[in-house]
Amino acid sequence: MKKTSISVLLLFSSAVSAQNLLETYNLALQNDPILRRSLAKKMAVGESKDQSIARLLPSVNAGIGSAYNWSYQDSFFNDAFPGQTPRNDFLDSQFGINLVQPIFHYDMWVQLSQSEKQIAQANASYLAEQQNLMLKTANAYFNVLAAQDDLTFAISEKKTIARQLEQAQQRFEVGLIAITDVYEAQAGYDQSRSDVIAAENNVQNTKEALKEIIGPYSGELSKLGEILPLPEPVPNNIDEWNTTALNQNLQILVARNESEIIQENIDIQRSGHYPTLDVVGSFGLNDISGNLNARGNTESIGVQLNIPLFEGGAVNSRTREAEYQFTEAKENLIATQRAVTKEVKDSYRGVISAISQVGALKSAVKSGKSSLNATEAGFDVGTRTMVDVLSTTRNYTNAQSKYSKSRYAYILNGVRLKNASSILSVTDLEAINRYLK
C-alpha cells in the first residue's frame, strides 16, 4: 500500500512540474524584453497628443531681474553744476510677464493630426508584438519538443546499432560473417554516438532560445499527445485568408500609418513658407531706487504677424526630403503587403501539406519498423548485409523524426496563418494546450 501511494505521488509531482504552452506564454508576457520595450514605446508615444495640444494653448512666462548701477561725473560737470553730487548710485529692479497665444500656426494643427496617427501606430505595433510573442513562444516551445524527440530517436538508434554491432562481432567470431560487416557496424555505431552528441547540443540550444523569450525556467515541457485532430483551415480558401490579412494585418496597419504620418510631414515642412499669427501681451514693473528714485509699469496687448521671406532654401530642401521619405514609406507599405501575402499563403499551404504528411509519415514509421525487422531477419539468415541493416535502421529513425516534426509543423503553420491575419489569440493557444500531456 505504501509503495503504491509513493508511486502515485511521484507521478503526480512529475505531472505538476511539466510546463505547458499556456504557462510558457504567461511567462513570456511577464519577461519578454521586446514586448516590454514595445509597451514603453506605446506609452511614450501616447504623450505626443498632449504635447501637440499644449503648443496650441497660451504660453506664459515671467521674468525678474535686479541690477545695481553707479556712475561718476567728470570735472566739467562739477564746474558747470557746483554743489551737485558727481556720483549716481541706484538699484534698478524689473519684473515682467509675457503671454503668447497662437492664432494661426499651420504646422501645429498638422502636428496634432500627426500625433493621433502616431498613437494609433504605436497601439497597432504593440498589439502586433503581443500576437508575435504568441508565435515566437509556440515556435520556441515546439522546437524544444522536436529537439528532445530527435535526441530520443538518436539514443534509440544508438542502442539498436550497439546491439547489431555486438551480434556482428559474435557472428564473426564463429565464422558466420566477414570482418567487413563488423567494420560497417562499428562505423554505424560511431556515427550514432556523434548523432546523439549533436542532438544533445541541439536540445540545449533550443532551450536557450526559449529562455531568451521567457527567462529562466525549470522542469520539463508538456509533450504533444498522440491524439491530434487535423482539421483544414476555416475558411478553406487561400484567397479569403489573404484578403483578411491585407485588410487587418497589424504590420500593414503600422506601415500604412507610417506613410500617412510622413505625408503630413510634407505639409509641416512646406508650412515654413506660411505666415504665423499670435496674440501677444505683456505686463512689466520697473523700480529704480537711490539717487534716481522712480517707479513705473507698462502694459501691452496686440497681435504679431510673422511672414517668412527667405531662409536660404532650407524650407524647400526639407520639403523635398519629406517627399522622398514619403516615397520610401509607400514602398515599405507595398513590401509589407507582399511579405504578408507570402506569409499567409506559405502558412496556408503548410497546414494543408502537413495534414497529408502526418498521415503518410505515420504509415512510413510503421512500415519502417517492419522493414527493419525484416532486414535484421534477413541478415540473420545471410540474405542481407550489415550495410542493409544500418541503412534500414537509419531510415526508420528518419521516418520517426519526420513524423514528429510534421505534427509540430501542422500546429505552427496554423499559428503562423492566424498571426499573419492578425486574428491570433490566447484562445488558439488554449486549444493547442488541450492536446499536450
Image: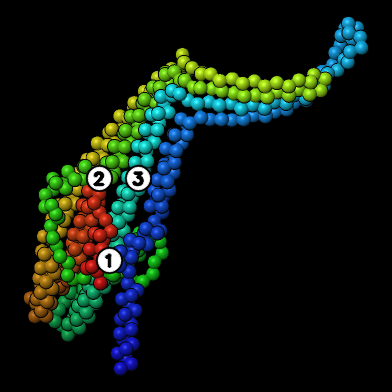
Of the pair 93 and 147, the residue shown nearer to us: 93
Q: Locate residue 97: give its quadrant.
A: top right
Answer with left or right where residue 357 lies relative to residue 287.
left
At mark 1, the secondary structure is helix
Tally of marks: 3
The residue at which mark 2 appears reads as 249
Establish if 180 lies above or below 402.
Answer: below
Marks 3 and 1, how far apart at CA = 34 Å
| Disc nearer the start of the sequence (3/1) | 3
User: Which amino acid lies under the numbered mark 1 shown in the image of this protein?
Assistant: Leu
Of the pair 99 and 276, the residue shown nearer to us: 99
The residue at which mark 1 appears reads as 145
Q: Mark 3 Cα within 10 Å, few/some/many (few <14, many 20+)?
A: many
- Residue 186, image x, y percentages: 24, 73
Residues at badges 2 and 3 in contact (C-beta under 8 Å)?
Answer: no
Could you tell me if residue 182 is visible in this image?
A: yes
Establish if 263 lies above or below 373.
Answer: above
Q: Which of marks 2 and 3 is in front?
A: 3
Identity of the residue drawn at 79% across and 20% down: 293
Quadrant containing the C terminus is bottom left
Marks 2 and 3, how far apart at CA = 13 Å
